[in-house]
Amino acid sequence: MILKIMFALFVIGLVPFIFENSYAQIKSGGFGDSPFERDFGDVKFLDAYFGTINEKIEVDSGDSNVPFTVVFANVGTQDITGIRGQLSLPLGFSASDGPGSIIRADSDSNSLAGENFYLTFFVNLDKNIRIQQYPGTVKVDYSRLRESGVRTAFADFDFKVTGDIVINVRAIEPFLTSLRTNDVVIEISNNGTAPISGVDITATNTQTELASTSSSITNVENVVILESSWDIGTIDPKSVRYLTATVYVPESLRGDTLRLPLSISYFNAHGDEKVISKIVDFYIKGLIDLTVFNTDVIDLSGKQMVIGEIINEGNEDGLFGFVTIEPRGNSNIKSSTQFIDEIEVDAPVPFNVPIEFDGEPKYGEHDITITIRYKDSTRDEVFLTHDTTIFVKEPSNDDDGDLDSTLIVIPIILAVGAGIFIIRRRKKAKIEAN
């Protein structure tokens, strides 16, 4: 019996020399090839990105002192403390302390078993860094509570230099006209180096929105906007997209600045949804609505003239007005201009431009263009053209003789009549005196 027990103990002692030790080792993901040996399984790598604990941020080449956060989970059964990290990044990334410095970080608190903890490093990016994905390695030193000594964990990971997004908005035509419907085009530009996707834009503080709010922050609720939301899609770096809207502006806003707030939601290069606010400003001009009517040709003191009237049916005066007559087709009428000054609202403004010919006079019908030139309240010059046909009469010699005789005879008749009247008054005065 004793011999059997001794033989069994001998066999058990001999087994370790016959069979090799067997261990499980993770080779995938670079763990087994890393310069840092991983012997413990208390810490698990989760994520690495530019940003802080609360928010990922966009970075571009040349940025300095940028936070770089690595997220771990304490998957062990005990709390850990004394957490310190060391970061190894490719060429072009350096510590914020300067090139050659080790990129280090300390955790501000202990990590409870089953909880996540963060290490935030601060990094400088070289100006030649490209927007792409890069590899990195992090080393974590820590201690388990109620245990002496320091344990080490490491992780290889990939991270991305995203580029940054710069969104600007502007109106292609920053002027609106009151008393009419305006077609508005707004440019949305991405002046950054990262694309933005899923761009949705909403006009805020409009009449519809104010139905559920208590106050207004702009005067946009006083206009009528037929469209209030737009799906833009993706805007690549250094590119623009456009949205269009139809806006009616009442007369009461003439001379004011209209501020149109826009809420822009999009997804950045991290895949996070962001919402920003932008305001597009417009200046509201008055309406100058001119019509030319009652054009004709009259003879004035032996000179034929083109006459007509201009009516302004808008709500603002036209300034520094000129009327120009120009020939069309076979007409040989010379171009002539008359200054008419202000073109007031609801008050017909007459004009009369003398007719002169280039060469021999041609009588009969002439096709002409009447051009009204004026300036609005922003001092922009505006042109209004009106095509019409006039009839130039040929003057007759009899008419000229009659006109000359009339100019002589009428004063004589008036003088004789005045003389007779004065003589009769004197005679009557003498009779009454006698």
Image (tube, rainbow, N blue to C red):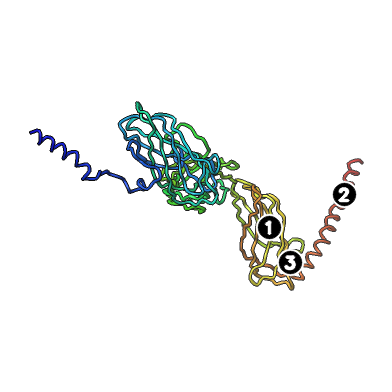
Query: In the structure shown, which secondary structural element does the residue marked by tag 3 occupy?
Result: loop
Earlier-in-chain disc, 1 versus 2 = 1
Q: Quadrant of the C terminus?
A: top right
Q: Quadrant of the N terminus?
A: top left
How much space separates mark 1 and mark 2, taking CA atoms?
Answer: 50 Å
Measured as percent of width and height from the top left, residue 331 is found at 67, 70
Of residue 223 and residue 152, the one placed in the foreground of this image is 152
Residue ID at (34%, 29%): 79
Of residue 177 and residue 169, the one placed in the foreground of this image is 169
For label 3, the residue is 356
Q: Which label sits on residue 323?
A: 1
Measured as percent of width and height from the top left, residue 404 is found at 81, 64
Of residue 151 and residue 390, the one placed in the foreground of this image is 151
Query: In the structure shown, which secondary structural element does the residue marked by tag 2 occupy?
Result: helix
Residue at the far left in the pictured view? 1
At label 3, which amino acid type do we have? Answer: Glu
Residue ID at (74%, 73%): 360
How many dots with numbers? 3
In the rendered view, would you say 99 is above or below 351? above
Q: Which label sits on residue 422?
A: 2
Residue 142 image-quadrant placement: top left
